[in-house]
Image (cartoon, helix red, strand yellow):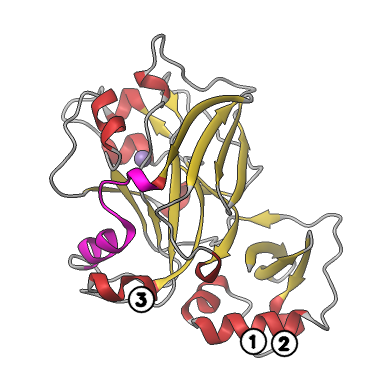
């Protein structure tokens, strides 16, 4: 099932997409949460109940709907650096012996179609195509063998990065370079995990103005999804709606010759098998 969040007069509400139309899941069945985090927390039973409720439901009017980031207010956005060996090497790093983790603040999220805003204090803004894992049931010290029971959905993500901050500032500023407002596009919708039986066989691509910049597969991940969940949850409690950006393959802008950085008017697309196309203009 494909899920989105839309803006209603009463606030953000979860909707399911079916044949290009959106259905408010709580209108269809008042026992289904209108809040995406609550929906994600509820597990496979809620997925079955929602699928059943769609049968007799009225779609939302197509005109004038405003979509928000599918999880509008994630508690945590956890990112993995250097998780494809070829990408680590193109940036001058050795593939790391254990996961390299950083984060973005929730203030950086934007939905499909919303602009990536170039900050005046950076001249080196770059794209990164990434598979994003969306946590359903939360937990701490989750074992690898149970990790997928905590995954509710997947989507495309763009780990937008100001390289002059991430790599050029004294001491390195990975957090600040990665967390400017609008630097965490994800979507265009969530795809529930039942539709992605293996997240490690997916073709992943990025395009800037239609030109392919990255083209790889999640089979190349150094640290797979289950290992990442076990690793991060050994440190902090994961909660429903947390996002895990799993790293980017080679072909990013700063490692090219000549380097490519995003410019006003550009359009960036991230496409992953089965997860649609995340498209954001740059302003
Ligand atoms: Mn990244």
Give the mark nearest the N terminus, 2 or 1.
Answer: 2
Q: State the residue at coordinates (37%, 30%).
A: 250
Q: State the residue at coordinates (66%, 81%).
A: 50
Q: Nearer the viewer, mark 1 or mark 3?
A: 1
Image-based side of 265 in relation to 176, left or right: right
Q: Nearer the viewer, mark 2 or mark 1?
A: 1
Taking the view exactly as shown, the residue that stands out farthest to the top is 258
Of residue 241 and residue 250, the one placed in the foreground of this image is: 250
Residue 201 rendering spot, x and y as whole percentages: 43, 51
Say above or below: 77 vs 192: above
Give the mark nearest the N terminus, 2 or 3.
Answer: 2
Q: Which residue is mark 3?
A: 138
Where in the image, quadrant-wise, is ligand 1 located? top left
Q: Which residue is mark 2?
A: 29
Secondary element at image label 3:
loop
The 10 Å Cα crowd at callout 2, few under 14, some 14 to 19, many 20 or more, is some
- Residue 49's disc is 1
Query: From mark 2 to mark 1, how far is it between C-alphas?
Result: 9 Å
Say above or below: 14 vs 208: below
Image-based side of 175 in relation to 63, left or right: left
Query: From mark 1 to mark 3, how far is it between C-alphas?
Result: 21 Å
Quadrant assignment for the C terminus: top right
Query: From mark 2 to mark 3, how far is it between C-alphas?
Result: 25 Å
Residue 38 rendering spot, x and y as whole percentages: 52, 78
From which residue to which does the magenta span run?
A: 219-233
Q: Main secondary structure of the magenta part?
A: helix
Q: Is the Cβ of the residue at disc 2 closer than 8 Å to that at disc 1?
A: yes
């Amino acid at each position: 099932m494909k899920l989105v969040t839309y803006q209603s007069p009463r606030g953000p509400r979860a909707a399911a997409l079916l044949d290009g139309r959106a259905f408010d899941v709580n209108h269809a069945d008042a026992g289904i949460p209108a809040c995406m985090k609550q929906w994600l927390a509820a597990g496979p039973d809620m997925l079955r109940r929602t699928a059943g409720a769609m049968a007799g439901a009225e779609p939302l009017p197509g005109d004038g709907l405003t979509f928000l980031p599918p999880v509008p207010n994630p508690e945590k956005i956890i990112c993995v650096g250097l998780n494809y060996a070829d990408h680590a090497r193109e940036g001058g790093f050795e593939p790391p012996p254990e996961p390299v983790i950083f984060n973005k603040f929730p203030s950086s999220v934007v939905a499909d179609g919303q602009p990536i805003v170039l900050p005046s204090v950076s001249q080196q803004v770059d794209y990164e195509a990434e598979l994003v894992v969306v946590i359903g049931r939360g937990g701490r010290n989750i074992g690898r063998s149970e990790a997928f029971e905590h995954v509710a959905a997947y989507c495309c993500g763009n780990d937008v990065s100001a390289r002059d901050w991430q790599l050029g500032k004294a001491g390195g500023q990975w957090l600040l370079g990665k967390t400017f407002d609008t630097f965490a596009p994800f979507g265009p919708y969530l795809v529930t995990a039942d539709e992605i039986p293996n997240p490690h066989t997916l073709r992943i691509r990025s395009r800037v103005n239609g030109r392919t910049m990255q083209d790889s597969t999640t089979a190349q991940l150094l640290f797979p999804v289950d290992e990442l969940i076990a690793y991060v949850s050994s440190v902090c409690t994961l909660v429903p709606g947390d996002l895990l950006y799993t790293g980017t393959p080679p072909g990013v802008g700063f490692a090219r010759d000549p380097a490519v950085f995003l410019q006003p008017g550009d359009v960036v697309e991230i496409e992953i098998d089965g997860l649609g196309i995340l498209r954001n203009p740059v302003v």
